[in-house]
Amino acid sequence: MENFTFHNPTKIIFGKDTEGQTGAEVARFARKVLLHFGGGSVVKSGLLDRVRASLKAAGVEAIELGGALPNPRVALVREGIALCRKEGIGFILAVGGGSVIDSAKAIAVGVPYSGDVWDFYEYTARPERALDVGVVLTIPAAGSESSNSSVISNLELKLKRGLTNDLLRPRFAIMNPELTYTLPAYQTACGSADIMAHVMERYFTNTEHVAFTDRLCEATLRTMIAAVPLALARPADYGARAEIMWAGTVAHNDLLSTGRVGDWGSHGIEHEISALYDVAHGAGLAVVFPAWMRFVLSHDVARFAQFAARVWDVEPDFQNLKTTALEGIARLESFFRSIGLPVRLSELGVGDERIGEMAEKSVVKGNGFLGNFVRLDAAAVREILMAAR
Amino acid sequence: MENFTFHNPTKIIFGKDTEGQTGAEVARFARKVLLHFGGGSVVKSGLLDRVRASLKAAGVEAIELGGALPNPRVALVREGIALCRKEGIGFILAVGGGSVIDSAKAIAVGVPYSGDVWDFYEYTARPERALDVGVVLTIPAAGSESSNSSVISNLELKLKRGLTNDLLRPRFAIMNPELTYTLPAYQTACGSADIMAHVMERYFTNTEHVAFTDRLCEATLRTMIAAVPLALARPADYGARAEIMWAGTVAHNDLLSTGRVGDWGSHGIEHEISALYDVAHGAGLAVVFPAWMRFVLSHDVARFAQFAARVWDVEPDFQNLKTTALEGIARLESFFRSIGLPVRLSELGVGDERIGEMAEKSVVKGNGFLGNFVRLDAAAVREILMAAR
C-alpha cells in the first residue's frame, strides 16, 4: 500500500425530497449565487422551479446561466466567469449531471484567475483559489459531485481535458434518487458504465497489498451489476436508483483509490473519442474498456482472474487463469451490451479514419505515454482502438 | 434505503513516516496545543519525542497532559479542561489510541462549556462548540480518529457513556501503520474485534434496499479476517497492518451506515461490562456479539445466512438457512478464539453476580430498551449475558 492523503469534505445530503434543502445549504455560504444548469430536463421536470423556490425561501438571489451541454464547453465557462465577475457572485450552484458540475467547477476556478481558464486545462497554470460550488445532482455517472476533477471540451482546439485539484471539491451535494427516474434508459446505462469505469480504473493497479480497496472496488461493481438491470426494468425503483446514485459517488470520491495507483488509460483514450465525435462518455468507455483489458491482460493475469471470480462469479480454472480472466472480460462486455450500450467503435459511428489521430493525441499529456497499470504509447493505443472497431 | 447526510471532513494522512507531518498540520490551526497522550508505549517507542520535535520545528508550543487510560476517565478530562483554560489553548493533539482520542474530544467540548463536561455524557446538555482536535493514531480499533463519538468512563458513578456529535470529528488523523508493529498481540486482537464489531453493528439492520452498504460491510469484514492472522503471525507485516488500520477507520467513519439504521445493542451491553470490570472493550465485544447474534437470529434468518455465506464462505444450505446462519456465527466465534480473544464472560473474569445490574443499566439510556435491529429489554440483555457465561 502506498502512502496517501484522503480528504473529502463534501457534505452529502441524500434521499427523497432533499432538493428542498438547497436554499438552506447555499445560505451557509452566500446570499447571491450563479445558478448553473443544462437544458430542458431540469426545466421540464420542475426541478429548476423547486430549486429556485428553495433559494428564494432562504433569501438567496440567483443569477441564472443555463445551456451547459454534455462534454461541456469552455466557451460557456468563459461566459459564466464574466457573469460572476459582473454580478459579484461568490458561489456557483450546479443543478444537473457531471457536465453541468464540471462546467461550474471551471467557472469557480476561472473567476479569481487573471488569465484564461483554459490555461488550467492545458496545464500551463495551476489554480490557487476557487469559488465555492454546491450541487443538486440529477445524473449518477461522473462522480463530479464530490470529486476533485473537472473535464472540459475546447471545440476550437478539438480538445477534451481534465483538471484535478482539491479546490474543485463541492461544498455539498444534494442527491435525490427520485430525480433519476426520468433519465432515458440509454443515459442510465451510459452513466452506469462511467461509474463502473471509475472503479475499474482504480482496480487495475500494480500496487501490492491493496486487499481492502480491492474488496471495496469489487463491492461497488457487484452493486452496479445487480442494480442497473433493475433500474432499467423499472425506472421508478427507488432502491435500485438509490444504490446506483450512491455507488456513483463512492466510485469517484477517492476512497477506492486510497493507497493505490490507478490506471486511467481507458479514460484517456475515451476522452479523445468524445472530443472528436461528441459521443456519450459512458458509451465510449463501454467500447474502450474491454478492448483495453484484452490488450493488457498478460501484464497481470492473476488480477484479471480475481476480477473475473470476485466480480463476475466466474468459477476459476486454477490450471488456466487466463481462461478465467478472459471469461471475466467477456462477461463485462456482455453486461454492457445487455444494458443497451455499444461495445464497438462502429456502433458509436466511429470509423477507422481518425484512429491514428486519436492515438497520437491521447499520449500528449503524458509525454508520449498513457496509463499506469500498463504504460501505453501511441502505437499501443492505436492497437486497442483497432481491436475495438 | 433511508435518507441520510454523510459529512466526514477529517483529513487522513496515511503511511510510513507520516508522523513527521504532525507539526505542519497542527500549525494550520494553532500555535499552542494541548499534547494529550496515555502511558508508556508512546514514550518508550520514541513517538512522543518525534511528535514533540515535529511540533517544535513548526513553531508550535505544546503543553503536555499524559496519563489517559483505557476506558478514559472523566477526572482526567476535567484536568485537561482546566489546563486548556489556564493556558489559553485552542487545539488538542491526541497521540495514542481511541482512549486518548476520546479523552481529547471530551476536553475539546468541555473547554467552551460553562457547566461540567459530564453533562454531555449524561445527555442533560448538548455541546454547541468545541476546540479542534488532531490525532496521531497508534492503535487501530475505536475508529475515533475520524468518528463523531467519544466514550468516557465515570468511576465514581461506575458509568461508561458515549457522546455523538459532529463537532467531535477530528480535523486530521495521521496514521502510520508502522506504529502498530509493537502492539501486544492481545491488543491487536482486541482492536480488531472492535473494528469488526463496528461493521457488524451497522450490518444487522431492518432497513431494506441496502445492497451497496451490505457489500461494503462484507468487504471490510473479509479484509479483517484475512489481515488479522497475518499481523499476529508477523507483527511487522506492513501490508497487513496497513489494511487493518485503514479498515478500522472506514469501519467507523459512517460510510458503512449511510442510509441504514444500525443496531448498537452489543456495544451497549459491552459498555456495562467494561464499566464494572474495566476489561478491554474489544474483548468484551468478542464475548457479547456471538451471544447477541444467537439471541436475535430468528428475527432475520436470511440476513444471518447472507452474513455466513458472504463473509465466512459458508456454503449455503438453501433448505435450511438457519443451519447456514448458525454456522456463520460459529465461525465468527472461532475466529475470535483463534486470534486469542475470550468468547465467554468467565474468560474475562466476569461472574454471574452482577449480570442483573448490567442488564438494568444497559437499557437506561433507551428508556428501558436497547438496540434497533431487535429491541432488547433488560430481561433480554440478561438472557444474552447468561448465555455468554
Image (tube, coloured by chain):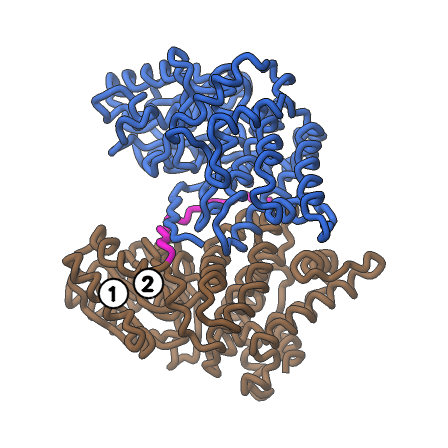
Chain colours: A blue, B brown
- Determine contact: label 2, label 1, CB under 8 Å: yes
Q: Callout 2, which amino acid?
A: Val
Q: Is residue B9 left or right of residue A322?
A: left
For residue B51, the mark is 1
The residue shown at (70%, 60%) is: B313
Judge whether A170 appears above or below B345 on screen.
above
Tell me the crowding category of disc 2: few under 14, some 14 to 19, or many 20 or more residues within 10 angstroms, Cα based: many
Instruction: Say if the magenta span includes residue B12.
Output: yes
Seen from this angle, which residue lies furthest front? A379
Q: Callout 1, which amino acid?
A: Val
Q: Which residues are magenta?
A: B1-15
Q: Is residue A49 visible?
A: no
Q: Earlier in the sequence, mark 2 or mark 1?
A: 1
Instruction: Say if the magenta span includes residue A248.
Output: no
Separation (CA) of disc 2 from disc 1: 9 Å
Of the 4 image quadrants, the one containing the C terminus of chain B is bottom right
Disc 1 secondary structure class:
helix
The residue shown at (61%, 81%) is: B344
Image spot of residue A241 (x, y percent) = 61, 35
The residue shown at (51%, 25%) is: A270
Image spot of residue B36 (x, y percent) = 27, 69
Image spot of residue B73 (x, y percent) = 35, 75
Q: Chain of mark 1?
A: B
